[in-house]
Amino acid sequence: MQCYGPAASAYTKNLIGSNKVRLEADSKNTNRDRYDRLLRYVYLPDGRLVAKELLSHGYAFAYTQFPFSKTDEFVAAETSAKQANLGLWSNCTVTVEQNGRKQTNNL
């Protein structure tokens, strides 16, 4: 288990709760990833994008290895959380692999 994983999971469950969400495809990406998982943006009833909320509060990384329409928005949200030392940025050791993928230390 990686550092801040349990906190990110709890935050996500609290954020979504029992709300119905809206799923939206990305025109720049395929419908499925290499593991055949369905790729969608998840929106809350109030219009907030779940991934951006996670990034903005330091609960996630912006994975930019593959093209998607919200790359700049997600990178900006991650950068803002990092600069503010929020979430995993103040509680974990973050490493960047050669391919640019970020990860935290294990618990």
Image (cartoon, rainbow, N blue to C red):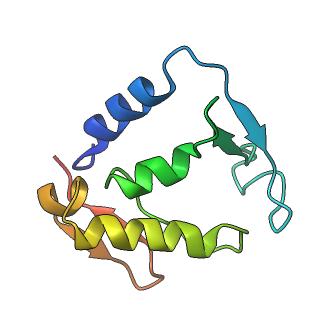
Name the outermost residue toward the front.
46
Q: Residue at x 41, y 85 (%)?
A: 98
Question: Which quadrant of the view contains residue 10?
Answer: top left
Name the outermost residue toward the bottom.
98
Q: Residue at x 46, y 48 (%)?
A: 53
Above or below, 9 against 52 in this view is above
> Picture coordinates of residue 102 (x, y %)?
37, 70
Name the outermost residue toward the top.
18
Question: Which quadrant of the view contains residue 5?
Answer: top left
Of residue 62 and residue 104, the one placed in the foreground of this image is 62
Left of 100 or right of it: where is 41?
Answer: right
> Picture coordinates of residue 103 (x, y %)?
33, 64
Of residue 66 and residue 71, the one placed in the foreground of this image is 71
Q: Residue at x 27, y 49 (%)?
A: 2
Quadrant of image for the N terminus: top left
> Picture coordinates of residue 6 (x, y %)?
28, 35
Left of 87 or right of it: where is 78?
Answer: right
Of residue 94 and residue 45, the one placed in the foreground of this image is 45
> Picture coordinates of residue 26 (x, y %)?
80, 58
Q: Residue at x 64, y 29 (%)?
A: 45
Above or below, 84 against 1 in this view is below
